[in-house]
Amino acid sequence: MGLFDKKECAICGKKVGLLGARKVEDGTICSDCNKKLSPLFSERKRSTVADIQQQLAYREQNKQNINFFNPTRVYGHGTKIYIDDNQRKFCVSRKSDYRAENADLIDFTQVTNANYRIDEDKTERFMTDSQGNERPYSPPQYDCSYEFEVYIGVNSPYFSEIKFDLTDSFGRPDSRYTDEYRRLEQMANEIVQTFGGGAAMGGAMGAAMGMGAMNGQMQGGYTQMNNGYQQPMQGGYQQQQPMQGGYAQQQPMQGGYAQQQPMQGGYQQQQPMQGGYAQQQPLQGGYQQQPVQGGYQQPTQGGYAQQPVQPQAPAQWTCPNCGSMNTTNFCQNCGTPKQ
């Protein structure tokens, strides 16, 4: 068999030449069958003919299902993500007609993670002096552009991640302070939040790791924001619950530090501390009560602090009969009464 002899497509049986043949692990398929595969699929050469047949059956079913797909939201410029909130499905298409492309329909339940990153492309500007030489500006000036890349992890037998850019090469913002930058950032946040995704990855790694908006929950003892409220932090840090009625509520801390219970009625309540420190009980009637041991300050009553009265030592007197010193009303030596 010659090098340029035509081969037979293992799927449709069509005769294909060298230029039209597409290799799979255990055979050859034609370019027409290859075009029917998912645009998100990249493992053809490591797939068997049986794998390809199974995927083509899935793609045929997808073609039927996408006719009933009705997006409620669309994000992006060149590549777009179409989201159907009613059916809880979405697809990503690099073409203007997602139905013609037969874009893969993905259920929300298939999403394993979602996040985005902002990449900054930064080029220094130079000026030309009177001698025609290029010189840097002082301070330096830069031309910048920002790319918003979205990553969605997917549980699918044919692909595990969808990656796309919300911008295109002609529509990337040139500053973090433009309306377009903020609009793209909002888009990325809304997409990620749709799938319950995690924090955004800042650009430069993108824009200096952290210039992108942070959303979702952060792990490892950092503040967790949810609907504008602060959730408990892990790892020994102070734990705060969402505010209720305008008063901060703090949970007890361990390890000998002050323990504070939620506030009630506008007054702060503190539980006793261990290890010899001052113990404070909840406020009652607007006055602070501090039980103290060993003769110190007692709880207040009626708004005034009450100090315990210390008994005075009895006065000594000298017996006129025998001359001994006494503190009682009768001499302890001879019984003579106190004068």
Image (cartoon, rainbow, N blue to C red):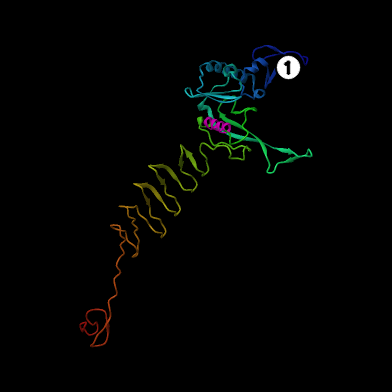
Q: Which residue is mark 1?
A: 19
Let me know if residue 189 is in the magenta part.
yes
- The spot of residue 51 in percent (x, y) is 61, 21
The three-letter code of the residue at mark 1 reads Leu
- Could you tell me which quadrant the C terminus lies in? bottom left
- The spot of residue 11 in percent (x, y) is 64, 14
- The spot of residue 36 in percent (x, y) is 62, 17
> How many labels, in total?
1
- Quarter where residue 304 is shown: bottom left
Check the image and name the residue furthest to the right. Answer: 131
Q: Which residues are magenta?
A: 179-191
Let me know if residue 246 is in the magenta part.
no
- Quarter where residue 106 is shown: top right
Quick check: 182 left or right of 130? left
The relative height of residue 285 versus residue 105 in the rendered view (above or below) is below
The relative height of residue 238 versus residue 175 in the rendered view (above or below) is below
Check the image and name the residue furthest to the top. Answer: 14
Q: 115 or 173, which is in the foreground?
A: 173
Q: Chief secondary structure of the magenta span?
A: helix
- The spot of residue 320 in percent (x, y) is 23, 87
- Quarter where residue 145 is shown: top right
Element under disc 1 = loop
Q: Residues within 10 Å of mark 1 (few under 14, many from 20)?
A: few
Quick check: 133 left or right of 39? right
- Could you tell me which quadrant the N terminus lies in? top right
The relative height of residue 337 versus residue 50 in the rendered view (above or below) is below
Residue at horizontal 64%, vertical 17%?
35
